[in-house]
């Protein structure tokens, strides 16, 4: 196991290097620079700013500088937010995204797995169809429809919670629910499929023949194998929830990292874009590794 | 997902919210005298010498004050940190007398030297201040800012004594006091604080954090959570603290206009930055007491590329202009009470209204086009309209496209680009007509007209007229208001005759305001000095 993890960690180094390199050059290929504005910036001033941030050097030289700093974990200063560094910005906003994503994923797992198990117990029954069609709706309803809808009902009509912001505990509910529902739906469908597959296998019949209770059969025998598809889905899903929360963060005005990811590209905040992409790459690699480990633990057929 | 789970969510919601009707934040804040202010974007910084935006102005104006301040109704200059000033007869030397009780938020007295050091700082090239050119009316400021002279002692600013500041200008500048009152570039920073947190002459100084920030305005910075909230609270060291009625302001940077409007309805804001276009009519009908539409000192126009072969002919440019029904655009497309623009400078800008006026005349436009050799648009290549991504810009471009087709038989194509790409195209001059907007930094015709100087980086049309340049330069050194306005009249007449641009409408500021907000006055710069604003529970 240790060798497996070590080997996987070694593989991430070239991956991150390629990600950093591609992003570094791609953001610079797009027309427009960080200091372009509607009000003309005098050329003398623009030169000074570019010199300060090292943008006056040849691009390859800038690249080497960047890699040098990256090795020390320094993602550089933000060009747009003059008094903040990219590291600081990520440190300030990522915990918010993590909290939102964690809650959404938790909700998605609790409701998704429960719904999936219930549906799989009586396949093709009315209960199954109800659970399946609700989860289909969950998949089809985009967050930018569901979010404003929730706000309309719970914030504007019922006045139970705020329409936006990230100040008190109640502010977490609507965004986490909105983000979680889409994933809950997918998880429900995956759980149902995985469970059905296992439930039809011989060892389940044997267990039944031996007189095991159905609770025991489901929780002890079926769930372990039935959840495998969900686990493989969780890696990309966790990464997706954390990186793809831009829409939710905008609708609910949440100070998370997802918004910075998108706005920094609009601002041509080169260091911010590159820094966040590298950070996300690390996250995705980490989650995939985590999923692999959990899979090996759940499924003895897999070897490392 | 199961209905059960929805039920669970609902139960959780009910539990957390305590089930009853909550008191809305906006109502609690009225009691606390905290203004909840929708401020659109996360500020770049709060250093008045570094930033460039309007949103930044709102926040900094709570933390800092100029030597001169703004009257809350008229925005005319009134004493700020300076209790009085004298202007030399030739209009070139200003002497400011700073109040004895003017203090920084850390208790230090505000001195003339603070301003000398501050002006040197913002003009130092290595700071890379995007807005430092606002100080260029000062003697030698431009040369110093461009690195042509390096001795700061040559700048036209000096302290006579601790409380007397003398400012010498290149030319008499009639709008100087307005600019000093309304524009943060003219305000001072506490240099000892700036020096403590990094190099004061380089970008990236961290003195603007809560706890470090030292200002001299009615409020102090108490919290700054990026993309969430910036809080300012009463500054007990402010010279006029007794007159301040608010206990503080919370600035909420809500980027999405829809989210902001919903937050207002949910009782989380007293003032929004904007209103979604589609909701203006609904507010007008159902809640007119919340909707504010104020004239705003800015214009929306189309640049015409003077190097384009089809647009080189003046008659074509005039025809395109005369075929536009601006009234229809503001009535049916923008719908925010905007005024159709028939000149470049908005009417009544510092007492100036352009005599020369464009007109809407379809028959005349057709004739001009025919004279230019393009009867019914024949032989004219399609006119490309270039704009940056936005629903409103697209809708306006489509309306103009239709008007040109219907009224002149001229085809037009639309070209949409993302903001920075659009800027790149515009400054590279690779467009045919391009949408633009200009918001004046100070109330004066010069703020608009100087953008069309042949050497101005804001021109971007390739239009180059030595006579226009001469008139604007002469006006900038003219001390007599009437003579100065006359020079602007001639310059604007020339601009509208040559027409390197098509003015479309003059801006309005459309926003929502809670009825509890008092002492808030409509004005054309959308400045509402927080010192005077207060909150009062509306009568039931």
Image (tube, coloured by chain):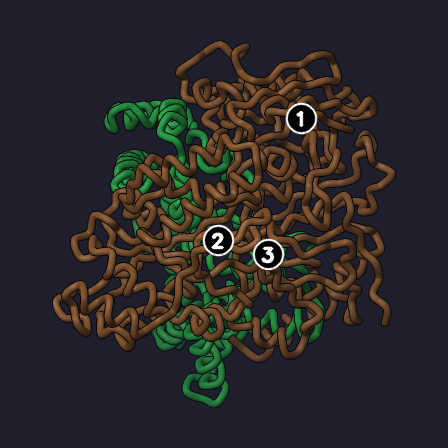
Chain colours: A green, B brown
What residue sits 56% from the left and 17% below the top? B156
Relative to B84, residue B298 above or below:
below
Quick one: label 3, few (<14), some, or many (20+) residues within 10 Å? many
| Quadrant of residue B31 within the rendered picture | bottom right
Mark closer to the observer (3, 1): 1
Left or right, residue A6 beside residue A76: left
Mark closest to the chain's N terminus, 3 or 2: 3
**Chain for disc number 3:** B
Kindly state the secondary structure of the residue where label 1 is placed: strand
- Residue B497, given in percent of the width and then of the height, sits at 34, 54
Residue A282 visible? The answer is no
**Chain for disc number 2:** B
Task: Name the residue carrying label 3.
Answer: B273
From the viewer's side, name the closer residue of A32 and B13: A32
Task: Name the residue carrying label 2.
Answer: B354
Relative to B278, residue B305 above or below:
above
Dot 2 and dot 1 residues touching (CB under 8 Å): no
Relative to B155, residue A158 above or below:
below
What number is the disc on residue B74?
Answer: none
Task: Name the residue carrying label 1.
Answer: B87
Marks 2 and 1 sit apart, C-alpha to C-alpha, by 28 Å
Marks 3 and 2 sit apart, C-alpha to C-alpha, by 30 Å
What residue sits 53% from the left and 28% below the top? B135
Kindly state the secondary structure of the residue where label 3 is placed: loop
- Residue B183, given in percent of the width and then of the height, sits at 59, 37
Q: Quadrant of the C terminus of chain B?
A: bottom right
What residue sits 28% from the left and 23% below the top? A57
């Amino acid at each position: 196991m240790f060798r497996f993890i070590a080997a996987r960690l070694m593989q991430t180094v070239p991956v991150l290097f390629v990600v950093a390199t591609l992003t570094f050059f791609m953001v610079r290929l797009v027309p427009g620079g960080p200091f372009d504005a509607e009000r003309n910036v005098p050329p003398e001033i623009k030169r000074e700013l570019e010199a300060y941030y090292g943008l006056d050097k040849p691009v390859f030289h800038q690249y080497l500088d960047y890699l040098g700093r990256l090795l020390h974990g320094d993602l550089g200063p933000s060009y747009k937010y003059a008094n903040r560094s990219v590291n600081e910005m990520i440190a300030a906003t990522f915990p918010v995204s993590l909290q939102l994503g964690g809650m959404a994923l938790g909700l998605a797992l609790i409701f998704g797995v429960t719904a999936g198990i219930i549906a799989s117990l009586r396949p093709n029954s009315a209960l199954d169809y109800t659970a399946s069609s609700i989860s289909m709706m969950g998949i089809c309803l985009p967050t930018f429809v569901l979010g404003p809808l929730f706000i309309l009902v719970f914030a504007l009509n019922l006045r139970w919670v705020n329409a936006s912001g990230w100040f008190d505990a109640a502010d977490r509910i609507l965004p986490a629910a909105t983000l979680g529902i889409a994933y809950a739906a997918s998880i429900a469908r995956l759980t149902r499929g995985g469970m059905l597959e296992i439930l039809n296998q011989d060892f389940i019949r044997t267990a039944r023949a031996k007189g095991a209770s159905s609770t025991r059969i489901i929780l002890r025998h079926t769930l372990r194998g039935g959840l495998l598809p969900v686990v493989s889905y969780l890696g990309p899903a966790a990464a997706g929830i954390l990186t793809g929360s831009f829409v939710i963060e905008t609708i609910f005005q949440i100070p998370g990292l997802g918004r910075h990811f998108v706005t920094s590209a609009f601002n041509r905040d080169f260091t911010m874009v590159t820094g966040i992409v590298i950070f996300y790459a690390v996250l995705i690699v980490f989650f995939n590794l985590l999923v692999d480990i959990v899979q090996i633990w759940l499924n003895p057929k897999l070897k490392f | 997902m199961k209905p059960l789970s929805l039920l669970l969510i609902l139960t959780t919601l009910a539990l957390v919210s305590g089930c009853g009707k909550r008191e809305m934040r906006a109502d609690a804040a009225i009691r606390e005298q905290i203004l909840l202010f929708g401020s659109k974007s996360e500020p770049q910084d709060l250093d008045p010498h570094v930033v460039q935006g309007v949103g930044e102005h709102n926040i900094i104006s709570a933390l800092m004050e100029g030597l001169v301040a703004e009257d809350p109704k008229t925005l005319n200059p009134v004493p700020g940190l300076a209790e009085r000033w004298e202007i030399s007869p030739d209009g070139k030397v200003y002497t400011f007398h700073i109040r004895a009780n003017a203090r920084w938020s850390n208790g230090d007295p505000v001195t003339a030297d603070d301003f000398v050091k501050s002006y040197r700082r913002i003009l130092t090239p290595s700071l890379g201040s995007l807005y430092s050119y606002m100080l260029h009316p000062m003697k030698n400021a431009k040369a110093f800012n461009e690195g042509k002279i390096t001795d700061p002692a040559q700048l036209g600013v000096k302290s006579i004594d601790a409380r007397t500041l003398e400012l010498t200008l290149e030319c008499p500048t009639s709008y100087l006091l307005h600019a000093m009152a309304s524009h943060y570039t003219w305000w001072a920073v506490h240099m000892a604080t700036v020096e403590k947190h990094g190099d004061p002459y380089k970008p990236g100084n961290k003195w603007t954090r809560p706890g470090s920030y030292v200002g001299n305005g009615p409020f102090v910075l108490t919290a700054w959570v990026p993309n969430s909230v910036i809080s300012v609270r009463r500054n007990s060291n402010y010279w006029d603290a007794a007159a301040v009625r608010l206990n503080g302001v919370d600035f909420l940077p809500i980027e999405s206009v829809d989210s902001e409007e919903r937050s207002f309805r949910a009782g989380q804001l007293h003032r929004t930055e904007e209103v979604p276009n589609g909701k203006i009519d609904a507010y007008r009908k159902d809640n007119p007491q919340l909707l504010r539409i104020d004239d705003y000192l800015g214009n929306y126009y189309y640049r015409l590329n003077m190097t384009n072969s089809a647009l080189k002919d003046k008659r074509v440019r005039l025809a395109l202009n005369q075929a536009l029904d601006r009234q229809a655009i503001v009535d049916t497309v923008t719908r925010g009470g905007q005024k159709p623009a028939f000149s470049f400078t908005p009417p009544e800008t510092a007492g100036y209204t352009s005599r020369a006026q464009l007109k809407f005349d379809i028959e005349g436009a057709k004739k001009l086009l025919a004279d230019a050799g393009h009867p019914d648009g024949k032989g004219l290549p399609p006119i490309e309209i270039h704009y940056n991504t936005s629903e409103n810009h697209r809708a306006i471009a489509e309306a103009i496209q239709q008007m040109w087709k219907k009224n002149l038989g001229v085809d037009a194509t639309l070209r949409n680009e993302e903001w920075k790409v659009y800027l790149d195209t515009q400054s590279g001059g690779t467009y045919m007509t391009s949408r633009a907007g200009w918001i004046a930094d100070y109330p004066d015709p010069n703020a608009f007209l100087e953008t069309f100087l042949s050497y101005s980086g804001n021109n971007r049309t390739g239009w180059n007229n030595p006579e226009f340049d001469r008139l604007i330069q002469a006006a900038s050194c003219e001390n007599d208001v009437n003579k100065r306005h006359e020079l602007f009249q001639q310059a604007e007449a020339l601009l509208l005759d040559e027409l390197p641009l098509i003015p479309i409408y003059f801006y309005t500021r459309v926003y929502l305001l809670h009825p509890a907000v008092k002492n808030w006055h409509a004005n054309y710069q959308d400045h509402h000095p927080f010192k005077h604003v207060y909150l009062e529970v509306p009568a039931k």
